[in-house]
Image: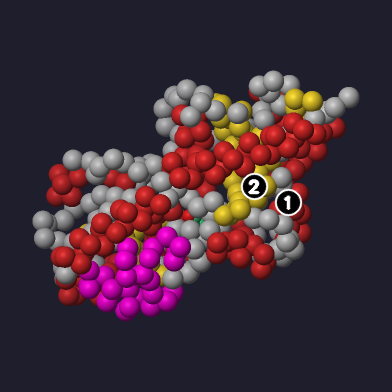
Amino acid sequence: MKIGIVLYPTYGGSGVVATELGKALAKKGHQVHFITYSQPVRLGKFRENIFYHEVAVSDYPLFDYQPYETILASKMVDVVKYEKLDILHVHYAIPHASAAYMAKQILHSQGIEIPFVTTLHGTDITLVGKDPSFEPVISFCINESDAVTAVSESLKLDTYRHFHTTREIHVIPNFIDAKEKVSESYCERRKCYAEREEPILCHVSNFRKVKRVEDVLRMFALVNKEIPSKLIFVGDGPERNNLERLSRELDLYEKVIFIGKVSDTSEALEMADLFILPSETESFGLAALEAMAVGVPVISSNTGGIPEVNIHGETGFLSEVGDVEDMAKNALILLKDKDLMMKFRCNALQRAKVFSLENVLPLYEQIYMDLIEQYSKRTKTVPSGHSKIKD
Ligand code: GMT
C-alpha cells in the first residue's frame, strides 16, 4: 500500500506513535509518505520505503496567523496525486482531519478518490478539542472520516461524550516495538546518576500543566525522606522553570536531575526503578508503556486510559489525581520489598507485550485494506496507485 501519514513531528506522544507506525509499515514493505512541517524527531536516519514531504509555511506579513491548515491540505493534494497514494492517515484531529477532508474534496473534484483515517490521540479531544471554538469542526471531521480510531476505550467514550457523533470508533491501543533485552551499558550509565543502592524514580513528559509535574516532585520528596533516592526528569516544556524553582524550595535540587529532551527515552527508563505518571488526564500514557517495556513498574494516577495500561497491584499502582501521599506510599511498598519489586518488574514486561507492534500493526493494516477495497469497488482502480472515479 502507499500510505500518507500526517502528524505533529514533535516530541508529543501522537507524533511518536505516528512515526513508529510509519516506520513499521515501511519495514513491512508498504510505501510511507510523512507529511508535516519538520522532520519527525523519531524518524532518524534514511530508511527504505520512507519519504518525507515538508509543509513549508512562508511568513507572509499580511497574516498575524499563517494559514497552516490550507497549506497542509494543498500539500496533501499534491502528494496523493503525484505519489499515487492509496490512503491518508491523519494523527490528531486538529487541524489534520479538517485538512484531510479539504484535500479529499479537492481531489474528488479532480476525479481522484482517496479514503482518510483519523486517529484521535487525547488532547485533541479531552483538552483542546472540547473547547467550543473547535467543536463543530471536530464533530464534522469525525463524522466525515472514512474510519476513526482512538488509542483507548476511555478516549472513545470521551469522544462520544464531547462531540456530536455516534459513528463507529475503533479502539487501537498505542504500541511498543520492544527491545529484545535491556542494553548492557545501562549499569555504567546508572552510575553517573545514583549510588548503587540508591533507587531512581523517573518521569518523562512535555512538562505541560496536564502532566502535574509538581506532583512528581512532591511525591518524590516523601519517598526521599524515607529512602534516599534520585529523581530523573526527561523532557522539557512550560512547567520546567516552576519545577526547578520548587525543587530548590524543597531542598531537593541535588537529588533531581533534568536530562532534557532525548529521542530515545528507553536509555533513561532502563536506569529507573519506578516510573511516575500523575497526569490530570491521559488518554493512554505512552510513556508509561515505554517504561513497562523495559521492566519498570508505574506509579500513576487513575485517570483516562492509564488503567487500561497500568494494572493496579500488578504492574504498578494507581491513585486518585493529586493524591501524592498515596503515590509515595505505593512507591515505598515496592522500594522496600525486593521480591515484590521483582514480581512487578516481570509483570510490567509481560503486560507491555500485549501492546507489541506485532499485535497492533495488523489492526491498522486491516482498516487500510478494508477502506481501499471499499473504494476500489466504487471506482475503477488504477493498479498500485490511487483510484479514479468510474467514467
Ligand atoms: O500529552 C502528551 O504527552 C502529548 C499528547 C499528544 O497529543 O501527542 O499525547 C496524547 O497522545 C499520546 C499518544 O496517543 C497518549 O499516549 C497520551 O496519553 C495523550 N496525552 C493526553 O491525553 C494528555
Tag 1: amino acid: Cys
Circle 1 sits on which residue?
141
Q: What stretch is highlighted in magenta?
A: 306-334
Residue 351 position (above or below residue 22): below
State left or right for residue 303 relative to residue 213: right
Q: For residue 248, what is the image quadrant?
A: bottom left
Q: Is residue 166 magenta?
A: no
Quarter the N terminus occupies: top right
- Could you tell which of marks 2 and 1 lies nearer the N-terminus? 2
State left or right for residue 13 relative to residue 390: left
Q: Which residue is drawn at 57% across and 55% down?
A: 171
Q: Where is residue 288 in the image (x, y as percent from the top left)?
A: 38, 57
Tell whether label 1 touches label 2 (CB within 8 Å). Answer: yes
Circle 1 residues within 10 Å: few <14, some 14–19, many ≥20? many
Between the residue at mark 2 and the residue at mark 1, the CA separation in whole angstroms equals: 9 Å
Tag 2: amino acid: Thr
Circle 2 residues within 10 Å: few <14, some 14–19, many ≥20? many
Q: Position of residue 170 (x, y in %)?
A: 61, 53
Secondary structure at badge 2 equals: strand
Circle 2 sits on which residue?
118
State left or right for residue 268 relative to residue 390: left
Q: Residue at x 54, y 54 (%)?
A: 151
Query: Label 2 CB, ligand 1: below 8 Å?
Result: no
Outermost residue, left side: 196
Quarter the C terminus occupies: top right
Indicate how the structure is coloured in the image: secondary structure
Q: For residue 199, what is the image quadrant?
A: bottom left
Residue 228 position (above or below residue 375): below
Q: Residue at x 18, y 40 (%)?
A: 184
Q: For residue 330, what is the image quadrant?
A: bottom left
Secondary structure at badge 1 equals: helix
